[in-house]
Amino acid sequence: MADDDLEEERRLCEAAHGGDRAALGKILRKHGPRLYRAVLLPRLGSRAIAEEALSTTYIKVVERFDKFTWQNVGVYPWLRVVAMRVALDILRSRKREVLFEPQDLEREIDASTGSDHDAEVLTRHDLALARKRVDDALSNINPRYAKAIRLRILEEQSREDAAAALEVSVATFDVVLHRAMAALRKVLAVKGEAA
Amino acid sequence: MTRWSELDDDDASLADALNAAYAPSDEADRQRLDELAAAATSAEDAATRADLEAAWRPGELDPEVHEELLRLALDASDNGALEEALAAAWRPTDLSEAVHEALLSAALDDPMAEPSREERRAASELRDALANRTDHPDVALAEALRSAAAPQPVSELVSARAARAAIDSGSATSAGGGKRSRVVVAFIGSALAAAAAFAIAVNIPRGPTPTGPTAAQPDLAQARSASELFSQKFERHQTSSRVDRIARARARDLRANRYAAWGVKP
């Protein structure tokens, strides 16, 4: 973050500490979208749940901002930990398959304590970690299954295009995709048990 | 002979073998040595054969390799990957049965095998669910994958509204008024009757109230019978899934009502 931006953020944080809600609003508007895209959505796996988590994160930030102490890397690392704690609570209460386990977030929160990385670095780290999770999960299933999921789910190609890429009929592709999702579910279940 | 420091990931099994050869501790190690013996006999490459033979004969581990191993073990306290590799080589643990099953499935499943009738039906359901974004476990899993691989940005409106709601909420609390924006979900009826209907009332007493021509009352989901959720009569002993379906549908209503009340979505 540029020095000017950092100084402006420090000034906003001071104002927010003094009870200036508009200043706190500026901080949240600046960093909220980043929290959603890099921290909440990849870990929670659902837009609706991530939006609610962002709302909860904001409320917790407002309630606890007096506990924040300024660091030279800005306020984002602190906001990120608040968001991860919210995500952790949600993950603990969920049953469905997701790519992140509560233990993953616990480790990340622990690793974040005393971190001196700024928002840009943390965001790149979070996005890369999430993408790696997907790659790791897909690497544990049959390559043809992985390709079906990449084409249809990740790249959102049409059934027809995905079937052509796999050189099968559309009806056969439907079956392959169903089997692929079942195989992935099995892999995630194993990972969950191991965690 | 290959030095320990020269081993890369692909040589992990050889590292494993070296240690098993050095101090075979159980039947699994001895069995592994037998396998190595067979591999050594058949290996065509001379260097590979030499390595395998060295691993095969307990007590014949090159002392230099052992020294190298010890030195690396002592010096590697700050190298997590190497520590893990050494620990795996020194004290190899059994493969988890569940992991083994998953590996077998990945290797043995034939993606092109003739599908059963049940598989065809499930594949059709998934096809429709993905197309219509309806409730289906794999639709949720697909969303989780997309969210992790390429998370989309949050709507500015959603973020701004949530920020304002949080700040207004905090202001109200700090002012001592104790009034917070609140969402009241009222479930009407007994536990069984919850399957029939419940009402959702959204009440946001604080915060900005739209005025003027854009202040039209949002179209909120109304309390209604749950019968529309079921096309056929439920069998006995399926009450849990029935209530789950109602709860999911009403949760969607609640979310839609909240967004409508905030003015985020029509």
Image (spheres, grey):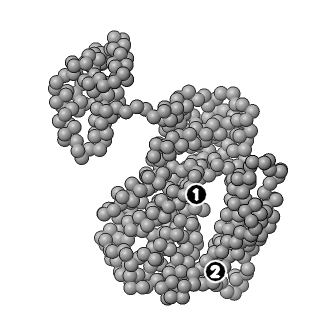
Label 2 packing within 10 angstroms: few (<14), some (14-19), many (20+): some
Crowdedness near tag 1: few (<14), some (14–19) or many (≥20) residues, C-alpha within 10 Å: many
Label 1 residue SS: loop
In this picture, is B207 found above or below B151? below
Quarter of the image for residue A186 reads top right
Q: Gap in Å between the C-alphas at discs 2 and 1? A: 25 Å
| Residue drawn where x is 68% and y is 36% of the image | A175
x and y percent of residue A168 in the render? 66, 32
The quarter of the picture where residue B53 lies is: top left
Q: Which amino acid does label 1 sit on?
A: Ser
Left or right? Give the position of B175 relative to B234: left
Q: Residue A60 shows which numbered tag?
A: none
Res B204 label: 2
Disc 1: which chain?
A: A
Q: In this view, does B161 lie above or below B174?
A: above
Asked if one can make out residue A8 in the rendered structure from this viewpoint, the answer is: no
What residue would you read off at disc 1? A46
Query: Disc 2 residue type?
Result: Ile
Q: Where is residue B37 in the image (x, y as percent from the top left)?
A: 33, 14
- The chain holding disc 2 is B
Task: Answer left or right for A193 relative to B11.
Answer: right
Q: Picture coordinates of residue A47 (x, y %)?
A: 58, 60
Q: In which quarter of the image is the N terminus of chain A?
A: bottom left
